[in-house]
């Protein structure tokens, strides 16, 4: 009886997938592609945010902040980066801070999540196009249950951020009073969960004033990690609860994300242990906490508890690599994603062993995933390389590794800086604006745009295979 029920459900699942594939094929033949819609959606949100931040009411002085600076800030907020050219805490009013918080939230969760909630409030149904955009936005394989997942993401985000705000309030309220303390708690909870790194403390201090505060550090770390491992990963963990039952994507995310956190912690601890400007003066417990926080922030969090400009060159070099890898797919963070990095490492292992395919956790990885991983990594590295070269010409006089740190931070939408983005020239700021946008939607989107082209007649021609020399 049970086997018959499982067989029937398997048949229904196959039929549903075939139907979804047919409908999606028809939409694509008509010229519809969800990826450009997502890219245009983020661009529209950035421009709208720049208009709001350019209003006199958004400025702390009542005078308009230059539109170009407002554009930089809006891009950084929507792309959940955290790089700023004006001090967030002192340059903007409460209205400006609220706008920033909403831009960060919409950028972190994805504008389509907000559109879905708005559609539901308006009583509007969801078309197939809406569902396809949601699917791409959340990086899901199928269309089934995608609307329910969007609502689950929104509800879960509220619960997690509310919890973080309550914990932050134990420090913020005694420091700033009830009203201001609650707002600061909510703002920093949103900023941490969305891996944005914006702070309201002023003077570009970020969380350096709390370097030894376990409550502030651990709360921020928890928010960053939950937001950074991806909504699908969290959903899978809560649903299945046992590692052996988790999906392959969830297992890869957890193992790779955890390994990178440990590696970053050990690298920072080793390189900065005796650095008098970073970990040197701290106690043993504070060193461990600060090193781990630095490793977490390299996952695209954007906060910092130690001076980034004072880091040793070796730390910046390794940190740049970790920033470029970033967080998990369908998360609030950026980078090429930990699963992309995992596939590349597994590909190297496959070649070294002389194997024909990648097998991990008793599952075989399709070769198209290898192609996508290599494409995404190549595009991100190429963007970073061009940016560093260009910025070194635009900003002469700065150390090359500091410029590298800035560019990789923008590509990975991390938001930590060794030179201070405010010191960039207008052309340098424009370059970082473009880079942040590409970093948020670019590596994955551009690769998929190439991968999902319609098959053309010339691609149907099969040419004979040949070999070239490698290595």
Image (cartoon, rainbow, N blue to C red):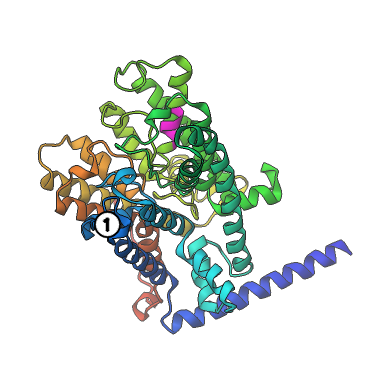
Q: Quadrant of residue 46?
A: bottom left
Q: Does residue 73 sit above or below 27 in this rendering?
A: above
Q: Position of residue 51 (x, y in %)?
A: 30, 65
- How many numbered discs? 1
State whether residue 471 appears in this view.
no
Looking at the image, which residue is at 32% across and 59% down? 57
Looking at the image, which residue is at 58% across and 72% down? 121
State whether residue 141 appears in this view.
yes
Q: Nearer the viewer, residue 202 or 49?
A: 202
Looking at the image, which residue is at 39% across and 28% down? 209
Q: Nearer the viewer, residue 199 or 399?
A: 199
Q: Which residue is mark 1?
A: 70
Judged from the image, the secondary structure of the residue bearing numbered disc 1 is helix
Q: Main secondary structure of the magenta part?
A: helix
Q: Does residue 65 sit above or below 170 in this rendering?
A: below
Q: Position of residue 431 (x, y in %)?
A: 21, 54
Q: Position of residue 419 (x, y in %)?
A: 22, 37
Look at the image and give the residue range highlighted in magenta. Answer: 291-296
Q: Position of residue 243 (x, y in %)?
A: 67, 42
Q: Which corner quadrant holds the C terminus?
A: top left
Residue 190 covered by magenta stretch: no
């Amino acid at each position: 009886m049970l086997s018959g029920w499982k067989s029937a459900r398997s048949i229904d699942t196959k039929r549903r997938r075939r139907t979804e594939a047919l409908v999606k094929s028809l939409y694509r033949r008509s010229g519809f592609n969800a990826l450009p819609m997502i890219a245009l959606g983020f661009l529209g949100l950035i421009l709208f945010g720049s208009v709001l931040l350019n209003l006199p009411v958004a400025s702390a002085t009542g005078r308009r902040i230059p539109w170009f600076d407002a554009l930089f800030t809006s891009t950084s907020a929507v792309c959940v980066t955290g790089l700023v050219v004006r001090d967030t805490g002192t340059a903007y009013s409460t209205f400006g801070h609220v706008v920033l918080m909403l831009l960060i939230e919409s950028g972190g969760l994805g504008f389509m999540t907000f559109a879905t909630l708005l559609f539901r409030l308006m009583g509007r149904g969801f078309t197939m196009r809406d569902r396809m955009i949601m699917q791409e936005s959340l990086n899901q394989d199928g269309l089934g249950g995608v609307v329910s997942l969007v609502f689950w993401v929104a509800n879960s985000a509220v619960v997690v951020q509310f919890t973080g705000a309550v914990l932050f309030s134990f420090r913020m309220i005694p420091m700033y009073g009830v009203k201001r303390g609650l707002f600061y708690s909510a703002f920093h909870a949103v900023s941490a969960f969305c891996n944005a790194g914006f702070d309201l403390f002023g003077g570009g201090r970020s969380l350096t004033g709390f370097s030894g505060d376990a409550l502030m550090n651990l709360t921020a770390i928890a928010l960053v990690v939950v937001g950074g491992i991806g909504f699908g990963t969290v959903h899978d963990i809560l649903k299945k609860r046992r590692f052996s039952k988790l999906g392959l994507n969830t297992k890869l995310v957890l193992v790779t994300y955890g390994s990178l956190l440990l590696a970053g912690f050990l690298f920072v601890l080793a390189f900065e242990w005796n650095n008098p400007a970073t970990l040197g003066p701290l106690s043993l417990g504070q060193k461990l906490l600060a090193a781990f926080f630095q490793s977490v922030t390299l996952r695209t969090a954007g906060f910092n508890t130690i001076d980034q400009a004072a880091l040793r060159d070796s730390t910046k070099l390794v940190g740049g690599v970790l920033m470029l890898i970033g967080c998990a797919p369908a998360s609030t963070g950026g980078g090429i994603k930990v699963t992309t990095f995992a596939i590349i490492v597994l590909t190297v292992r496959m070649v070294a062993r002389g194997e024909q395919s990648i097998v991990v956790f008793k599952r075989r990885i399709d070769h198209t995933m290898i192609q996508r991983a290599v494409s995404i990594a190549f595009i991100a590295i190429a963007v970073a390389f061009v940016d560093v070269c260009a910025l070194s010409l635009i900003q002469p006089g700065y150390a090359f590794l500091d410029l590298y740190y800035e560019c990789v931070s923008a590509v990975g939408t991390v938001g930590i800086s060794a030179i201070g983005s405010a010191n960039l020239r207008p052309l340098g700021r424009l370059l970082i604006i473009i880079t942040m946008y590409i970093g948020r939607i670019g590596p994955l989107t551009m690769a998929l745009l190439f991968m999902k082209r319609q098959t053309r007649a010339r691609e149907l021609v099969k040419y004979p295979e040949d070999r070239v020399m490698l290595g």
